[in-house]
Amino acid sequence: MPDFVPDLAIILAFGLASFVLAISPGPDMALFVSRTLNHGRAHGFAAVFGAISGIFFHSLLAAFGVSMLLIAAPTAFFVLKILGALYLLYLAVQAVRQGGGLTLSKKPRKAPRLFESYLTGVGINLTNPKIILFFVTFLPQFVSTADPAAPQKLLFLSAEFVLVALPVVTVIIFLADGVARVLTRSLRAQKVLNWSFATVFAGFAATILLLEGRR
């Protein structure tokens, strides 16, 4: 077996952890669903691929040890989390504005470009504390610092995370697109959905800010 491939037990354990993280509600999942409901599957997948780009960025940092600087420099980590909270609040405001990012209608306002949905996925992933903590503190536990192939194994596990998470979000996007066909017939359902997503985004932002305020 190549040196960069972890033991089977580690692959299975990390795969389970990745699946649990992928199905857990979070701002990334809310973004995928909201983009799909408003602008179609293409925008949903654009946001997903943006998030995947962010995941590879996290994995590169973890693999080469730069991520540990966030632990060694609490101020930098604090600033990153606050920026993430502010970004989530921005998305919450957009969700309830007239013609905002979560508005469903039979004649929607001009949709964003696919690249904009991609960049939004990148941004929400890079500032998502759940993902940051997973790659900075949890992922390195599956390798030994004394292992000369540790960076390569971290990259392997990061790729495994993507392979586990991608089918999960794909199912979510296809289900969301089907729901959108029904919701476009109900104005009340649209408003409830928009406020629900706004609540999710704002709730995560508030949680981050409250936890940091108590420290």
Image: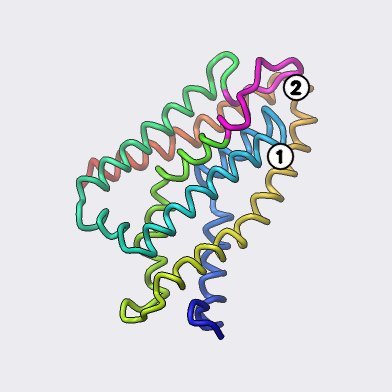
In the rendered image, which quarter is residue 105 located in?
A: top right
Specify the label residue 176 is tagged with.
1
Q: Position of residue 96 (x, y in %)?
A: 53, 21
Q: Secondary structure at mark 1?
A: helix
Tell me the tag on residue 91. none
> Looking at numbered disc 2 in the image, what kind of residue is underneath it?
Ser
Classify residue 215 as left or right of residue 171.
left
User: In this figure, which residue is indicated by the disc labeled 2?
Assistant: 186
Of the image marks 1 and 2, the number of the one nearer the N terminus:
1
Residue located 51% across and 46% down the image: 26
How far is the residue under mark 1 from the one under mark 2?
A: 15 Å
* Camera-nearest residue between 37 and 57: 57
What residue range appears in magenta? 101-117
User: Dot 1: few (<14), some (14–19), or many (≥20) neighbours within 10 Å?
Assistant: many
Name above or below for residue 190 compared with residue 107. below
Image label count: 2
Percent coordinates x, y for residue 145 in the rendering: 32, 76
Quadrant in the picture for residue 46: top right
| Horizontal side of residue 73 vs 48, given as left or right | left
- Give residue 111's position: percent from left, percent from top: 65, 22
Q: What residue is shown at x 36% (from left), y 81% (from top)?
A: 147
Where is residue 92? Give x, y as percent: 48, 28
Name the amino acid, label 1.
Answer: Ala
Location of residue 78 with respect to 6 vertically, above or below: above
Q: Secondary structure at mark 2?
A: loop
